[in-house]
Image (tube, helix red, strand yellow):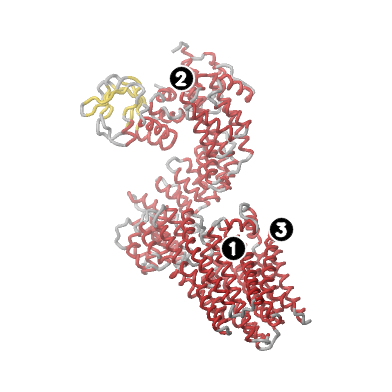
């Protein structure tokens, strides 16, 4: 039963709780609104038929004010209290109104009218806000349809219930206010339950929401944002004029209905309720049966005009024959199309608006402010024309014609701008497929997306496909078939998957060829296609003669069987897989094992067959190991994480290990940090980790890098800085400047000056600019190289604290060796970095500062000096840098510095072949005694 | 027999290796083996697959193409490097014209070093770019 529900409703077991609670909420919220509207309209018209324009204006003002206060409170009051408080307030209000109606107080009907529309605006908004908080974006895309069905069903159920209660004279229209109050109280309880069930997730979402600091915060800022975009202005105008028009239509309908049922409040309320009920059902049917098809066939360029054109015809009918039938047809066409075709068209118009956060802000602004303002303007228009100029409800159509023609004019502007904005959004990849609200893609949008598939690299095409997948039936587009020949396996697999989903059987012959594709993912997808659409048995395929090697077919079958998740298939797949591992010795044995390892990458991580992964990582053949590493990354296998990190130290496998770890993403961060900071881990392995962290490229990865900067090995420090620089270039927000960088910069600067003192003492000519360097001794050159690396680390640190591009340019200028460019670079630095830091830098880098001045500055900074060549050599002989130490030993021997013979004995060298060899050579030369 | 650092200090004199850091050059030096040739000894022949390069320490090597002398290589020059880097057959034969002492580096070892240490690759590229620009 549960499985049936999962499949039928597209809701997963774990989502049943929130999905049903939200469904029930929207059912009650929309139900209470329809009940309240049916009786509220009837009661008000019965009491004050001439004051409808004024109450429309009052409603716009009150609802607008309430929405504004509510939005302000969302930043100050806990959302749970605010939502429940608002619903309890509405519920209590309707209970109080019901009580007041007993005293025959007429003004309360105006208040009820206003409250009905306030509830109608706020209660569904609360529901959708709650749904967005409780569900992740992926969950939302999957189950919003089910939740929305609550609203769709709630409307006719409540309408027919209201009609039944009043028509049978079971209750007075006023008594229905009690039902409204109870339904709203039920909504409050449902909100409480929903919060209780999903507290943890909502806390996360609350934090995330408050973190987005750059977005506009109030209506003023949002309006400024909209004004900055011609497209957003046009959308806002389109929605505003549509809203104003429908208010005029609603006025005509209500007044003509009132005239028809004059004096009979119960009959009017019953009529409104039944009308809403039938039209609700009809709108549901139109939405289910026609909206998607119309959008796909006609495209947004046509559907955007449907509503104003239909209204033109309906308004003409009401003008010529202002009777209940013509008014009902006009209002009916509104209810039928406004919440089906027009709503879907509006969602598509929001599609290219990015980023997604601003999209929801703009929607809130339009719902909360633009709609109310348009209502208010319509109220004023009605007041002028109906109350002052005494236009009959039928003649109001004349006014409406003006609005409708303006609507059509704006629609032309929107249509033209939509295509431009959509193309730009695709080029810049600003659309997020996971956060696109629309479920249907119209033909216009699809064509623009399909054009994008014909050019661009793998990532561009995959992005285009992900957007195309937003529509429910994407497979029909011929552009997809062409992608089966695309160079990228990921594109071929995705395109085939979409064609298979769409049931496109015209590509069968092409798919058969894909059984021999180089990528196992594509082969498995091809096999899946053939099994589903041609009824081929995967096991018989293995005994069929093909041009493909046995292990390729076996691999495809294993991948396919494992994906089906059927126990029998899994067992059969495992037998075939083990056969691949124990293939008879020969050239194909290692290839079969490599293929088996590759297949593990496309098999679910929890499958029993995955236990073979570790043995394949330890395989004797590097090609097998490589595929096993990549498979570990694809499946994010936790057991394999340590072996994958260990392989970073193997030069033959470092590429695969890095790619695999990047696939693990944040799941590997903790273990990577431990390895990075563990001195017992081989340095070759540790030095690869910063590059991996840069590929993971998240804020957490950047934090791990920044927190690991303090390393003894200068090479590792350099790798860490390089990774941080990469992340900063990618997204400056990932690596905010911090005090560790400043401390590290000071330490590196001091190290640089110390190296300078040593070099100047050993070989003063070696301190000249890079271009002026010539045939130096080995030690001089090694010291210069150390200083070059120190300088690069200094500039990499500066790149974390100041604009990286400017710092990089300054660095390139400084090492160029051309005096004019070096001077320019020094000048750039003067304007870029703070003055004390500049002074420290300039003394080392400015070609106009002489050696004496530099040494003087170095002495002040390091609080020490190096007096002679011998002292410089003594220092380097005890350096932590093994290479420098060896070069210093070599220099002592080369120069036959007998005064350092005693020092030589204290230099640790045993156990290191390089130091050992050089020490012996130097010792022998000193022992020989005569100069070369 | 030369120590590793002696080899480094000699190798760094070759234009093609000058852009490589000394520590990275130590890897090349580790793969370099001392070897001696008598005069008229052929180091490699024209059209043979390039499997070795030679760094001349002493003596002279002459490159011969179709029996014609093409170029002479003296101390601190590298013979066969272009063919090894390009992976193309040697365009000319190399013959010792005097007693020659050299360092011999196998192509596969050299490739491995370039793959493992980007500094070596970058240094070689720098030298090739400089060569193409006519600086050497």
Q: Are marks 1 and 2 in contact (CB under 8 Å)?
A: no
Comparing A436 with A315, the one in front is A315
Q: Earlier in the sequence, mark 1 or mark 3?
A: 3
The residue indicated by pointer 1 is A363
| Tags 1 and 2 both on a single chain | yes
Front one among A297 and A79: A297
Question: In the picture provided, is A408 more to the left or to the right than A580?
Answer: right
Residue A76 circle label: 3
Does label 2 or label 3 sit earlier along the sequence? 3
Q: Is residue A830 above or below residue A23?
A: above
**Dot placed on the residue nearer the N-terminal end, 1 or 2:** 1
Q: Quadrant of the C terminus of chain A?
A: top left
Q: Position of residue A494 (x, y in %)?
A: 42, 59
Relative depth, front residue between A31 and B117: A31
Q: Residue at x 43, y 37 (%)?
A: B116
Same chain for mark 2 and mark 3? The answer is yes
Please indicate, yes or no, whether residue A681 appears anywhere in the rendered image. Answer: no
């Amino acid at each position: 039963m549960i499985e049936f529900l999962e499949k039928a409703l597209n809701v997963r077991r774990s989502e049943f709780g929130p999905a049903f609670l939200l469904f029930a909420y929207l059912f009650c919220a929309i139900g209470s609104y329809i009940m309240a509207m049916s009786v509220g309209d009837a009661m008000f018209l019965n009491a004050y038929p001439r004051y409808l324009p004024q109450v429309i204006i009052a409603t716009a003002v009150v609802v607008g004010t309430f929405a504004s206060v509510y939005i302000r409170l969302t930043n100050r009051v806990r959302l749970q209290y605010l939502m429940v408080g608002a619903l309890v307030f509405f519920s209590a209000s309707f209970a109080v109104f019901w009580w007041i109606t007993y005293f025959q107080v007429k003004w309360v009907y105006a208040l009820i009218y206003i409250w009905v529309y306030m509830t109608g605006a706020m209660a569904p908004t609360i529901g959708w806000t709650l749904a967005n908080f409780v569900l992740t974006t992926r969950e939302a895309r999957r189950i919003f349809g089910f939740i929305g069905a609550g609203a769709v069903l709630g409307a006719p159920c409540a309408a027919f219930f209201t009609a039944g209660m009043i028509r049978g004279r079971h209750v007075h229209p006023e008594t229905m206010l009690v039902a409204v109050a109870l339904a709203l109280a039920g909504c409050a309880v449902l909100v409480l339950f929903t919060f209780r069930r999903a507290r943890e997730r909502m806390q996360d979402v609350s934090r995330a929401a408050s973190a987005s600091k750059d977005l506009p915060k109030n209506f003023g800022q949002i309006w400024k944002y909209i004004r900055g975009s011609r497209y957003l202005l046009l959308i806002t105008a389109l929605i505003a004029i549509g809203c104003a028009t429908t208010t005029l239509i609603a006025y005509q309908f209500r007044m003509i209905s009132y005239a028809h049922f004059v004096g009979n409040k119960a009959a009017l309320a019953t009529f409104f309720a039944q009308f809403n009920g039938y039209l609700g059902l009809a709108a549901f049917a139109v939405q289910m049966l026609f909206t998607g098809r119309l959008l796909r066939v006609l495209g947004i360029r046509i559907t955007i005009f449907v509503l104003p054109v239909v209204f033109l015809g309906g308004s003409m009918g009401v003008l010529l024959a202002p009777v209940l039938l013509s008014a009902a047809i006009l209002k009916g066409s509104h209810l039928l199309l406004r919440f089906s075709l027009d709503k879907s068209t509006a969602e598509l118009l929001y599609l290219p608006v990015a980023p997604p956060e601003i999209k929801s802000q703009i929607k809130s602004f339009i719902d909360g402010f633009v709609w109310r303002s348009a209502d208010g303007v319509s109220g004023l228009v009605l007041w002028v024309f109906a109350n002052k100029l005494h236009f009959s409800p039928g003649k109001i159509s004349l006014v409406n014609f003006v609005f409708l023609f303006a609507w059509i004019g704006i629609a032309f502007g929107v249509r033209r701008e939509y295509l431009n904005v959509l193309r730009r959004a695709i080029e810049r990849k600003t659309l997020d497929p996971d956060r696109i609200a629309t479920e249907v893609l119209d033909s216009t949008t699809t064509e623009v997306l399909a054009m994008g598939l014909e050019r661009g690299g793998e990532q561009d095409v995959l992005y285009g496909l992900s957007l195309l997948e937003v529509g429910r039936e994407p497979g029909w587009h011929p552009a997809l078939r062409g992608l089966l020949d695309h160079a990228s396996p990921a594109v071929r697999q995705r395109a085939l998957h979409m064609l298979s989903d769409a049931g496109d059987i015209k590509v069968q012959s092409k798919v058969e060829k894909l059984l021999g594709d180089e990528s196992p993912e594509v082969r498995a997808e091809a096999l899946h296609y053939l099994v589903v659409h041609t009824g081929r048995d995967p096991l018989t395929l293995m005994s069929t003669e093909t041009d493909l090697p046995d292990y390729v077919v076996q691999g495809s079958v294993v991948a396919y069987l494992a994906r089906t998740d059927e126990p029998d298939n899994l067992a059969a797949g495992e037998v075939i897989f083990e056969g691949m591992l124990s293939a008879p010795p020969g050239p194909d044995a290692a290839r079969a094992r490599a293929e088996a390892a590759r297949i593990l990458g496309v098999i679910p991580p929890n499958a029993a067959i995955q236990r073979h992964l570790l043995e394949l990582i330890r395989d004797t053949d590097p090609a097998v190991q490589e595929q096993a590493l990549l498979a570990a990354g694809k499946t994010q296998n936790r057991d394999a994480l340590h072996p994958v990190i260990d392989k970073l130290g193997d030069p033959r496998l470092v590429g695969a290990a890095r790619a695999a770890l990047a696939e693990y993403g944040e799941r590997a961060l903790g273990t990577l940090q431990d390895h990075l900071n563990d001195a017992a881990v081989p340095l070759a392995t540790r030095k690869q980790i910063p590059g991996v962290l840069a590929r993971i490229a998240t804020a957490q990865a950047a934090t791990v890098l920044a927190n690991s900067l303090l390393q003894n090995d200068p090479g590792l420090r350099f790798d860490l800085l390089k990774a941080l620089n990469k992340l900063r270039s990618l997204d400056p927000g990932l690596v905010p400047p911090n005090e560790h960088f400043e401390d590290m910069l000071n330490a590196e600067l001091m190290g640089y000056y110390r190296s300078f003192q040593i070099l100047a003492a050993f070989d003063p000519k070696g301190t000249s600019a890079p271009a002026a360097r010539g045939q130096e001794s080995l030690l001089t050159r090694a010291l210069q190289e150390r200083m070059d690396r120190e300088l690069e680390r200094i500039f990499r640190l500066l790149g974390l604290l100041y604009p990286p591009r400017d710092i990089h340019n300054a660095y390139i200028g400084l090492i160029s060796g051309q005096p004019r460019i070096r001077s320019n670079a020094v000048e750039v630095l003067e304007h870029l970095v703070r003055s004390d830091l500049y002074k420290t830098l300039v003394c080392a880098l400015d070609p106009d500062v002489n050696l004496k001045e530099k040494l003087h500055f170095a002495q002040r900074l390091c609080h020490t000096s190096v007096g002679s060549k011998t002292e410089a050599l003594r220092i380097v002989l005890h350096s932590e840098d093994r290479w420098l130490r060896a070069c210093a030993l070599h220099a002592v021997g080369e120069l036959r510095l007998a005064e350092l013979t005693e020092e030589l004995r204290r230099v640790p060298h045993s156990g290191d072949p390089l130091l050992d060899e050089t020490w012996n050579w130097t010792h022998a030369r000193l022992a020989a005694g005569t100069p070369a | 027999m030369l120590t590793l650092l002696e080899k480094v200090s000699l190798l760094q004199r070759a234009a093609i290796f000058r852009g490589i850091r000394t520590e990275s050059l130590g890897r090349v030096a580790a793969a370099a083996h001392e070897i001696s040739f008598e005069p008229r000894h052929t180091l490699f022949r024209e059209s043979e697959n390039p499997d070795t390069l030679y760094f001349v320490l002493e003596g002279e090597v002459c490159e011969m193409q179709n029996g014609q002398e093409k170029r002479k290589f003296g101390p601190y020059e590298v013979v066969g490097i272009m063919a090894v880097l390009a992976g193309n057959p040697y365009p000319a034969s190399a013959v010792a014209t005097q007693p020659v002492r050299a360092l011999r580096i196998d192509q596969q070892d050299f490739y491995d070093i370039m793959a493992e240490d980007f500094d070596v690759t970058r240094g070689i590229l720098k030298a090739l770019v400089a060569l193409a620009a006519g600086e050497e």
